[in-house]
Image: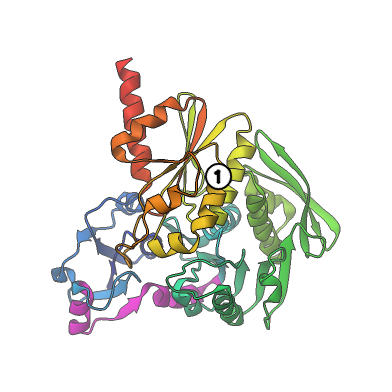
Amino acid sequence: MTIYHFIGIKGTGMSALAQILHDSGEKVQGSDVDKVFFTQRSLEEKQIPILPFSKDNITEELTIIAGNAFSDDHAEIQAAKELGLPFYRYHDFLGEWLKQYTSIAVTGAHGKTSTTGLLAHVLYQNYPISYLIGDGTGHGQIDSKYFVFEACEYRRHFLAYQPDYAIMTNIDYDHPDYFTSIDDVFDAFQSMAENVKKGIIACGDDEHLQQIQAKVPVLYYGFAESNDFQAKNINETSEGTTFDVFVRNNYYATFTIPMYGNHNILNALSVITICHYENMTADEIQKISTFTGVKRRFTEKQLGNQILIDDYAHHPKEIEATLDSVRKKYPNKKVTAIFQPHTYTRTKTFLQEFADSLNTADHVFLCDIFGSAREGSGKLTIHDLQALIENSQLLTIGNIDVLAAYTDSVFVFMGAGDIQKFQEAYEKIAQESTSEA
């Protein structure tokens, strides 16, 4: 019996896939850097071994699954190739694994993780399922009826998949280090659409998704009258958002989600659409109301009279959506945005858009740009963004205590890098000052 060895097991997709194989009865281990990542807690809870990178980890009985961030000259990959071991890249292995199930891919420029989590939650309340969420959460069951997974467009990795269904949340320009234009992104999604075997659930309010051509049925959802599935009569309460769903202009049912903002209604509507298409009852789908969220997506914590929110938003549209949700949930509180840009190319490409979206907050703090594994540094600095946001301030771990002055405020820590360390540092200082008092 082979042991699956994950090179870069702490990556969000890799961590989730390792958990799925483990839950499905396979032997799993992995290697990574020593740095602590939020994804590793689940691996440790399942007692999946995490080794420091070393070519000595690579032995005869292994099947290798390598994370996409690691090039072929990585020491462990070279050792695996020298031994002639079975070798897969993450997306290629996942493409093979999901063929055992009725698979549902969730893709889009924004909202993938939240939508995958929401769909997995609803299906899991009703059936045995497996799921892979991009927040590092994975669950496997041998008798799964469905396999729900997040499919990333970066470097066209999602073309390794041939899912039964695909949910497409939106098409937008991102990953400017790879895609050349919005047309290039659309081309990738069009190619993905051609891989889908049974049906596509697409947001009809998205002008680019309206242009998708497919050989399978395309069901559209959204707020506009022209959609197959439409949300109407939206009502926001202290518990969340309630709305009616109309199917081809006929009232279907009323749903409640414990979230705020139009983007969350659209995510929920995509889930309702696929579940309805798969003949689930309204009662079964209404279990959507018990969803508790995914990691690093509007994750809340109270600290005295301050609310701390951790969110993965790293694109201007995502920042806009997150801040909109905060305003709707906390209409009487001041909103303080703490943003760490992710990658120099993305920051440069969307510099003005970042400024515009952050300007909707009452106060803005900026952290240094977080370079990705693919890109160490750039000529651009955080000062270029600061210059476009009036009264914005720079935040470091060293001056984190400035946040204490913003009483009765909502702090939104946003970014795809290591923004969590700023929140952790602030929590530590706040708790120390409380205990001293």
Residue 159 point in image, percent of width and height: 50, 79
Residue pictured at 39% horizontal, 61% vertical: 343
Residue 420 point in image, percent of width and height: 37, 44
Residue pictured at 35% horizontal, 20% vertical: 434
Residue pictured at 21% horizontal, 55% vertical: 34
Residue furthest to the left in view is 56
Residue interval drawn in magenta: 76-102
Instruction: Decide if residue 140 is in sight here.
Output: no
Residue beneath disc 1? 359
Q: Secondary structure at mark 1?
A: loop
Residue 96 magenta-highlighted: yes
Which sits in the foreground, 129 or 38? Answer: 38
Amino acid at circle 1: Asn
Which sits in the foreground, 24 or 68? Answer: 68
Residue 97 point in image, percent of width and height: 44, 74
If the image is split into quadrants, where does the N terminus sit?
bottom left
- Looking at the image, residue 89 sits to the left or right of residue 145; the answer is left
